[in-house]
Image (tube, rainbow, N blue to C red):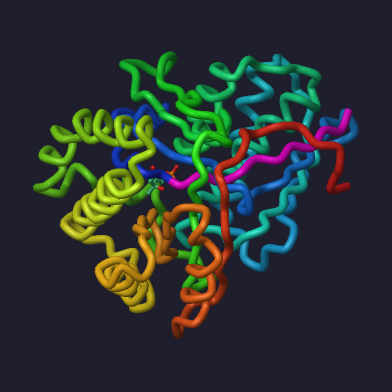
């Protein structure tokens, strides 16, 4: 049986940075994110007794590292163990955005792979179990499983660290206007970045403040206080990058255009032209968070900045799910 799934990438307002256990990907702190309507992966999977090995292709990608292919094979092996089958799979997967540039491609990639592969074996996990399973494939993938605005609780062991919906997708009309500044893959993967977090002298202080930060941003979200919400998420992004910059060796994910955009966002806000806030994941891409009414004007402004390659508007959206349009 062939099944196809669609999963959206997500943007973290409070970031996951550092793992308690690199193997099971239990994080050091809770994180909060939103699924992104215009940034997704579609994956089709089919298990077939005629196959002598997994047959995997990344549609539209010029560069596929051996490591990436191995991660997909490992994910399929985990699914095989879970489902007690020895069958190999044909998998085709396609992103509608450049991977490894600071948009969570592993989140949408692994969430769509899990939903398609379990579906192809005629098995449907409950949302919590699916989120836990996806976390073991790629941490942020667990947040692409539930709908809308999501919290990933760190839990205290591998069986109770999962993501769930805080508010549905239609709860709040805010947008992530994504400004891609390069389509080249970053040099330091987030897996390597996570592993370095502990080497930063600032990391313990960051961790001590996380519960309070989570509490405050939830209050801002509950009351839809956009200014408070924006200030918290922007400060949080800088805090995460402060850890990267002070790790040994240091990790600098930004490009000159990244900084140019950050300065513009602050300037437009200070001049009361348009109120928006930036956040940045492990890459040079800038995610500009704004109210729905300001998304188009921000897209126009960001598109004019030299070095910006592409701008997309993303609304909050639903979680990973099966669709009928197969890739083969
Ligand atoms: O799932 P990973 O290993 O790609 O983690 C990336 C974490 C950040 O994107 C930098 C922050 C986050 O919470 O999404």
Q: In the figure, is residue 298 to the left or right of 190? A: right
Quarter of the image where one finds residue 95: bottom right
Q: In the figure, is residue 196 to the left or right of 59? A: left
Q: Position of residue 69 (x, y in %)?
A: 62, 49
In the image, 25 versus 267, the foreground residue is: 267
In the image, 107 versus 37, the foreground residue is: 37
* Looking at the image, residue 101 lies above or below residue 210: below
Quarter of the image where one finds residue 187: bottom left
- Give the number of callouts: 0
In the image, 77 versus 10, the foreground residue is: 10
For the point 73% across and 30% down, the residue is 117
For the point 66% across and 38% down, the residue is 112
Q: Where is residue 147 in the image (x, y as percent from the top left)?
A: 58, 31
Ligand 1 found in image quarter? top left
Q: In the figure, is residue 67 to the left or right of 122? A: left
Quarter of the image where one finds residue 85: top right
What's the magenta region?
1-11
Q: Where is residue 181 in the image (x, y as percent from the top left)?
A: 47, 73
Please, what is the dominant secondary structure of the magenta stretch?
Answer: strand
| Residue 27 in view, yes or no | yes
| Residue 136 in view, yes or no | no
For the point 84% across and 48% down, the residue is 327
For the point 61% across and 33% down, the residue is 319
Q: Quadrant of the N terminus?
A: top right
Does 77 appear in magenta? no
Q: Where is residue 179 in the image (x, y as percent from the top left)?
A: 49, 67
Does 8 appear in magenta? yes
In the image, 280 versus 89, the foreground residue is: 280
Residue most toward the bottom? 306
């Amino acid at each position: 049986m062939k099944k196809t799934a669609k999963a959206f990438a997500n943007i973290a307002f409070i970031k996951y940075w550092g793992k308690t256990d690199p193997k099971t990907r239990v994080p050091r702190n809770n994180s909060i994110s939103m699924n992104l309507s215009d940034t997704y992966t579609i994956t089709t999977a089919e298990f077939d007794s005629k196959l002598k090995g997994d047959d995997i292709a990344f549609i539209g990608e010029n560069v596929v590292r051996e490591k990436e292919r191995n991660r997909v094979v490992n994910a399929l092996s985990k699914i095989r163990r879970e489902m007690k089958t020895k069958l190999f799979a044909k998998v085709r997967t396609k992103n509608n955005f450049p991977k490894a540039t600071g948009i969570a491609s592993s989140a949408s990639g692994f969430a769509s792979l899990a939903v398609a592969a379990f579906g192809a074996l005629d098995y449907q996990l409950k949302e919590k179990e699916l989120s836990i399973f996806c976390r073991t494939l790629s941490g942020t993938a667990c947040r692409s499983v539930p709908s809308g605005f999501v919290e990933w609780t760190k839990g205290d062991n591998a069986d109770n660290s999962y993501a769930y919906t805080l508010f549905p997708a239609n709860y709040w009309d805010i947008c992530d206007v994504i400004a891609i500044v390069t389509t080249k893959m970053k040099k330091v993967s987030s897996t390597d970045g996570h592993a370095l977090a502990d080497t930063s002298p600032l990391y313990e202080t960051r961790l001590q403040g996380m519960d309070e930060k989570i509490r405050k941003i939830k209050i801002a979200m509950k009351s839809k206080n956009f200014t408070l919400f924006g200030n918290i998420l922007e400060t949080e992004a800088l805090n995460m990058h402060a850890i990267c910059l002070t790790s040994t060796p240091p990790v600098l994910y930004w490009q000159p255009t990244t900084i140019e955009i950050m300065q513009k966002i602050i300037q437009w806000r200070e001049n009361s032209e348009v109120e928006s806030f930036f956040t940045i994941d492990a890459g040079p891409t800038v995610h500009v968070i704004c109210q729905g009414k300001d998304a188009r004007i921000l897209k126009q402004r960001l598109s004019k900045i030299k070095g910006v390659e592409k701008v997309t508007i993303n609304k909050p959206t639903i979680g990973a799910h099966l669709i009928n349009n197969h890739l083969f």
